[in-house]
Image (spheres, helix red, strand yellow):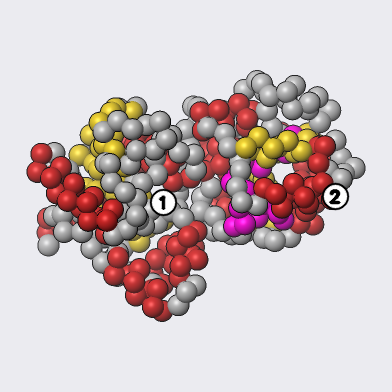
Amino acid sequence: MRIGLVSVDFYPNVGGVAAHVVELGKALVKQGHDVHVITLPIAVERSRESEFHGMQVHRTPFPKQKPVYSWLTNWWLRQFLQLQPLDVIHVHGLRPVEATRGLNVPVVFTNHTSGFLKRILRGLGEHRRLAERLKHVAHVLAPSDELVQATKTVGYQGPVTFISNGVDTNRFQPGEPSHREHWHAADDRVVVLLARRLVEKNGVTVFAEAVTRLRDLPVRVIFAGDGDDRGKVEEIVSQGQMRDECRFLGNILNTDMPDIYRSADISVLPSFMEATSITGLESMATGLPLVGTRVGGIPVLIDDEVSGLLVDPGQPIQIADAIRRLVVSPDLRQRMGEQARRRASELFCWNRIATETVAVYEQSCTQRAAA
């Protein structure tokens, strides 16, 4: 198929949406599809036209602010489609949705983020606005049942399908740790990893409170990510006399993350809102047991008591107790890590996710042809 992926978030950005678009595009290319990515100049990537892992990347020079972005991108897409017809356009994130109206091509939209969940809390007026923005969309995909239901709640009338995020199980796999010495994490230390943006919805201050309850254990706590709540997190672990056991790495490029996971023993997802977490999937693929909250798509990832442990959101005592179980039992860590790796490989590899996504593309094209 000839596929257009439209997203304002793409390489070299870090984060869930950017990683999803990159990995989905790579998997589609491997399956033989012709993939075009329509995005913006980001950081050092400014070229109008380039190739990235077999995808043709088009970076439009338009301001990100709406409604100017929507008008100019819609104009650009109309010109592009005359020269390069596409079978389907797949939009990632809300910002580009209006730009895909009236293009005479079926539009699929992936409702990625917890920002949508926050929007629907604003009431019926916001519901109507969201439904209007999605009116032309042929099919909505969502990486959690929570986001599936939220899409229906606003009044979208088309089909909505759950398709998980995925993971490259070849790139993310167990291997030799390379950072433990640098982290001063000797063999008798258990490395607990939080690979998240340090923002409220990710439950990072709750995790910090849990860390302060681990003072009696031989742990090294790694924060791979940055964000507005970093100051609060550092204050909590300092007051809890655990600052010396913590390392704050700041934002890490996705290309460097496999070695971060391989140097850890446990990964934690303390989120208040979450889809099928990409960092969770990467942790699983690398053979790490997960401790995660019962929100969004996390219970889809974790087979409780088999590949990891589920806890309630906002409960630092439960998080600390779950981490403690894994810290004191190397056999449990190993068994759950092996199950996590197996689960990632069988259920969440990108080839499988791409195949499920292409089935939706084909269905949308068939429905349009029959209309």
Span of residues in magenta = 191-206
Q: Is residue 200 above or below residue 39?
A: below
Indicate left or right for 14 with 21 as reference: right
View extreme (bottom): residue = 124
Which class describes the residues within 10 Å of circle 1: few (<14), some (14-19), or many (20+)? many
Residue at x-position 67% and y-position 48%: 230
Indicate left or right for 238 with 42 as reference: right
Residue at x-position 16% and y-position 59%: 102
Query: Is the C-beta separation of discs 2 and 1 under 8 Å?
Result: no
- Does 198 lie within the magenta span? yes
Residue 2 image offset from top left, x and y in percent: 20, 39
Residue 274 image offset from top left, x and y in percent: 54, 55
Residue 45 occupies which quadrant of the picture?
top left
Tell me the quarter of the image containing the C terminus: bottom left
Q: Secondary structure at mark 2?
A: loop
Tell me the quarter of the image containing the N terminus: top left
Say if residue 276 shows up in the picture: yes
- Does 112 lie within the magenta span? no
Which one is in front, 285 or 304?
285
Which one is in front, 160 or 13?
13
View extreme (right): residue = 216
Q: Is residue 217 above or below residue 370?
A: above
Residue at x-position 76% and y-position 56%: 316
Residue at x-position 84% and y-position 50%: 239
Q: Secondary structure at mark 1?
A: loop
Q: Is residue 178 above or below residue 8?
A: above
Amino acid type assigned to the residue bearing label 1 in the image: Ile
The residue identified by callout 2 is 240
Amino acid type assigned to the residue bearing label 2 in the image: Gly
The residue identified by callout 1 is 163
Mark 2 or 1: in front is 2
